[in-house]
Amino acid sequence: MTQKLFISNANQVVTMAGHSDKPAKKEAMSDITILEHGSIWIEDGKIVEVGTDAEMREKYQGQLDSVTEIDASGKTVTPGLIDPHTHLVHAGTRENEYAMRLKGKTYMEIMESGGGIHATTRATQAASYETLYEASKKRLDKFLLHGVTTVEAKSGYGLTLEHELKQLEVAEQLRQNHPIDIVSTFMGAHAVPLDEKRNPEAFVTRVVEEMIPEVAERKLATFNDVFCERGVFTPEQSKRVLEAGKQYGLTPKIHADEIEAYAGAELAAEVGAISADHLLKASDAGIKAMAEKEVVGVLLPGTAFFLMAEFAPARKMIDAGVAVALSTDQNPGSSPTISLPFIMNLGCLKMNMTPEEVLTATTINAAHAIGCAGEAGSLEAGKKADITIFDVPNYLTLSYQYGMNHVDTVIKSGKQLVVEGRLQ
Ligand SMILES: N=CN[C@@H](CCC(=O)O)C(=O)O
Ligand SMILES: [Zn+2]
């Protein structure tokens, strides 16, 4: 029997319609399409129609008795939020490093002395599959509670074939068992292991010749990412890793220009990356190249906030024609948050993005950054019924009443998973 759901009479339905083929750029990032007193008709997990409540009641009047109705009066409905950059699968926490940074140590100093990514790698290698699975599942539940229905998840805390596969297999099992959609990224080139520091080229060769082929063979990832940063991987090494992934059907992504300008944005354009992420220090030439080659810029203002760094030049990027997306960068070192709504607040308050732009950046543009804009990221007929209902009267209030979780209801593929802010 057809499962029907009717979300009725929302104060605002923000559809994000019209950007599924290409990400929204420049002024189009403000084009979010709002229906006042809007309703959505859903059948078998897919959106059938979005319209005003009056229109929809008339059209579907014969079926209103048999449908499950969610009264969204006074509330705001958006597409389920999409987080396009997370380090979801990891073990351990690094509050000790947070305390060190507050006393003046830098993120890179901590990493160079064996902490940072290395600390989480030790914890992740030591963790059993089950421990990693349970910890990551808990994080996914929290993402749901914050209105998120799709996440990208990277490996990169294994740094050996065995442990990289363990992380990716946890993500794969969660993809099958958890209602949130997960898109996986291989990130074997996240750091050079401490005991191989003297010969980074040999490690890059292992990533290229041993890890990438095995990950691709097992179909454990869609994307291939690298931390291109001075003291981590050079642009040349990064290019080797990304080009090798392409040979095996893995689409490039890149952690670029986070701590210093290092031609990461330029490299993203050169290799045809789907996104370049961080970009705090991206050069003007790099930004231009990204705009020309339609590389999505995934900005991570939570990381700048938490590392007390300068924020990425979002305005400059949007004005230059880069399609911008936003993400939590969820990880235990540089951004231990799960709140994508707070990231939206930071986008407005710290990067001069508008409330409309941050909504675009966490829905349809985020979907483009991970290749799922055909089925998610907007409220349009035929797409998955991935929907978040916020207990606020309009979308502006999401930015205005900052740092709060306004999520009331989350619907994933037509199923109510969060009701009145609680997991079902
Ligand atoms: N910058 C590189 N990688 C992660 C942080 C990883 C960590 O510190 O554990 C990031 O995106 O911020
Ligand atoms: Zn990251």
Image: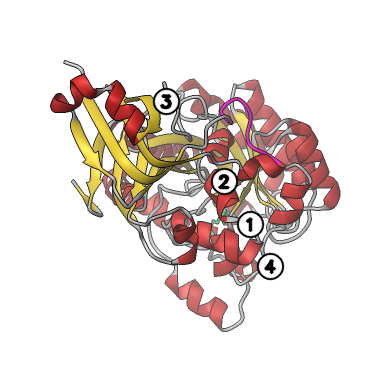
Distance Cα–Cα, label 3 vs label 2: 18 Å
User: Which label's residue is closer to the chain start, 1 or 4?
Assistant: 4
Q: Residue at x 53, y 66 (%)?
A: 115
User: Which residue appears at 30% of the width and 44% of the height?
Assistant: 410
Q: Percent position (x, y) of residue 354?
A: 61, 56
Per the image, the residue denoted by label 3 is 383
- The circle on residue 361 is 2
Residue 318, given in percent of the width and then of the height, sits at 72, 48
Residue 21 belongs to magenta span:
yes
Could you tell which of marks 3 and 2 lies nearer the N-terminus?
Answer: 2
In this picture, which residue range is highlighted in magenta?
19-25
* Quadrant in the rendering for residue 58: top left
Element at badge 3?
loop
Of the numbered discs 3 and 1, the one sitting upstream in the chain is 1
* Labels 1 & 2 near each other (Cβ < 8 A): yes
Label 3 amino acid? Answer: Lys
Q: From the viewer's perspective, is the residue at label 2 or at label 4 nearer?
A: 2
Q: Secondary structure at mark 2?
A: helix
Of the numbered discs 2 and 4, the one sitting upstream in the chain is 4
Q: Nearer the viewer, mark 1 or mark 4?
A: 1
Q: Callout 1, which amino acid? A: Met
Label 4 within 8 A of ligand 1 by Cβ: no
How far is mark 3 from mark 1, CA to CA? 27 Å
Among the 4 quarters of the image, the one containing residue 203 = top right
In the picture as drawn, the residue positioned furthest to the left comes out as: 65
Q: How many marks?
A: 4
